Each structure stands twice: as structure tokens, then as C-alpha cells.
Amino acid sequence: MGVALFRWLGQTARRSASCRGQGRVDPVSEGREGAQWKADGALVLLTVFWGLTFVVVKDALAFADPFTFLTLRFVVGGAVMALLARGRMFAPGIVPKGLLLAVVLFVCFALQTVGLTDTTPSRAAFLTGLNVLFVPLMSMVLLKRLPRWGTSVGVVLAAVGLYWLTRPTGGEALPGDMGGLLLGDWLSIGCAVAYAGHILLTERFATKDNAVGLVAVQLAGVAVMSALCMPFVERKLEWSQPLVVAVLTCGVLASAVAILVQTWGQARTTAVRAALIFALEPVFASAFSVAVGREVLGPKEWLGGALIVVGVFASELGTAVWDGWRARGRTPAA
């Protein structure tokens, strides 16, 4: 449904913008844009999986230390991807690229998971979601690449929406919370920076035919790095239903499936667009919290969620209209 909606929006905006040029649309451009709408729609769907994980992981950490949980999670996810990948894990160039992505991905999940032990899910969701700002900033500084105007408007709207939705200074009171940032908050910010780097690297390395092997190497690498950290932390492991559910849910859906979809999607869209779509994650996280009775949203939270959605659609429609106008300008007069 998400894919179809994004495709329809793109086609409608593009055709409206090109109508003065006698409605002629370059079929090559149309095919390329159609692939991008599919990719964007798929990225929206994976944010649903990620939106489930904040509450699920927070509950699981009552029964396992962060690195034991990460090891279990990525062993499950890595096993699933190894079965799918088979020999594709060792295709030329896959292992070094996958290991580099694995290092960055490990930093992301280690900071996020450890951070959740010292902050609330809502604060962690907001601060992790700051990658929607870090990706275009890093893209401009490192790659000298300016985002399109529609994407820039969407990023601003999404950032404001993230603030209102997740109330980084509100919600559950925490020991040591005096209105400033906790250690868990700083770790979540570090996660956002690392994840912005992961998004940019994925855009650079992902192609339309190497996603499965690349993800399999990543997940295996994160599992090994998590296991290597276990001797250096206070171990905790109490098998329980919440822990098993969290390991299976995060391992299969939020790791294997979600990161595979991310890699596949980013081979067909830009890093900045992907980061903007990922800003929907706290919207789904809040919706899940409301559905299970863990949280009640007020007017400001609903406004924040609406701004994020508007920001995503502003980016999609603005980019489509701009591309349509450019195509119309290149169309020779009859």
C-alpha cells in the first residue's frame, strides 16, 4: 500500500507539472522515478518494523545486558541472511564493504541499546531520529552535495515534528534528569551520527544486485563484534518470554528483513530522502506505544506526528514537481 501511494503521488505531481509541455514524459525518466517510488515506499514499510523496537528492546533489557542481547539478535538475523545469501556473501568486493558497514552498524546499535538503559524510549527515539539532520549536513560537508529544495523543506518539518512528537524533556522522569542531557541521551545522539554515516555508506556501496550478500556480511560482523564485547561488561541473561520475543522480532524483522530492505531501497534512492523517510520511525513507535497502552498522546504529540508525515510528503511531492518542471523546460517546443 505504501509503495502504491508513493507511486501515485509521484506520477500525479510529475504529470501535473509537465502538462504544459503537452504531457510528454521521458519514458526512461519515468521508469527510473517509478523505481524510486517503490524504494521510498519500501523504506516507509521498514520504519514500521523499527518503530516496534524501542519498547520491545527496552523491555528485553530487563532480562539481558546490552551486548548479550545484541549478540543474540544478530546471530538470529545473520543466520537468516546467511541462508538467503549462500555464496553471494563472498562475491568480489562484498566482504570488505560489508565489514566496513558492519563496524558502523555495530556502533549504531551498541550506542542505541546501551543508551536505552539510561533514558526513556521517547527521548531515545527523538535523539536517534536526529539523523534526519545529520545526513544532509554530512552529505554537504563530505560529499559537497546540496539537497533539493523540497527535501530541505521536508527535513525542517520532520525535525520540528520529531521534537513535538517525542518530547525529549518530557515523559517519564529519570534519576539524574535535571532538565539536561543524560548519558543515555548522549549515546543516542552518537547513534544518530553513526547511523547517518551508515546511511551514506549504504548509498555508496549498495547496488541493485548485491543487497543480500552485503547485509549477510554486515549482520555476521555485528554479531561477532557484540560477542567480543561480552567479557568486558557485567553479564546478565534471564530467559523469559519478553526476551525471546524481542530476540526473534528484532533479529528477523528489524535486522534481517529491515536492513535488507534498507540496502535494496538505498540502491534506488538518495541518502537524504532515506533519512527523511526514516523520520517516520518515532511516529510508528508512538503509535505502537499507544496501541499497547504504554503511552497516551496529547495534542502536541499528534501535531508532531502530523508534521513528520507532512514533511515526508512535502519532500516527495516537491521533488516530483521540480523534476516535472525541469523536464518541461527541456521539452522542445512543438
Image (cartoon, grey):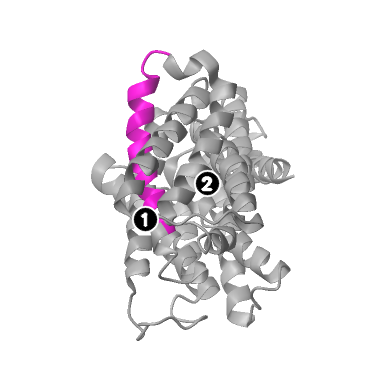
Residue 319: numbered disc: 2
Q: Taking 178 as reference, is 73 above or below it? A: above
Q: Which residue is drawn at 42% across and 15% down?
A: 90
Looking at numbered disc 2 in the image, what kind of residue is underneath it? Answer: Thr
1 or 2: tag closer to the N-terminus = 1
Looking at numbered disc 1 in the image, what kind of residue is underneath it? Answer: Leu
Instruction: Decide whether residue 127 is among the magenta residues.
Output: no
The reply, left or right, for residue 260 in relation to residue 3 is left
- Residue highlighted by disc 1: 111
Picture coordinates of residue 181, whole percent (x, y): 33, 75
Segment colored magenta? 91-113
Q: Residue furthest right?
A: 1
Residue 139 in which image quadrant? top left
The reply, left or right, for residue 103 in relation to residue 148 is left
Residue density around tag 2, few if under 14, some if 14–19, many if 20 or more, within 10 Å: some
Q: In this rendered view, identify the residue nearer to me: 271 or 328.
A: 271
Give the label, 1 or 2, closer to the camera.
Answer: 1
Q: In this rendered view, identify the residue nearer to me: 155 or 305.
A: 305
Q: Taking 326 as reference, is 190 above or below it? A: below
The reply, left or right, for residue 19 in relation to residue 207 is right
Residue 331 visible in rendering: no
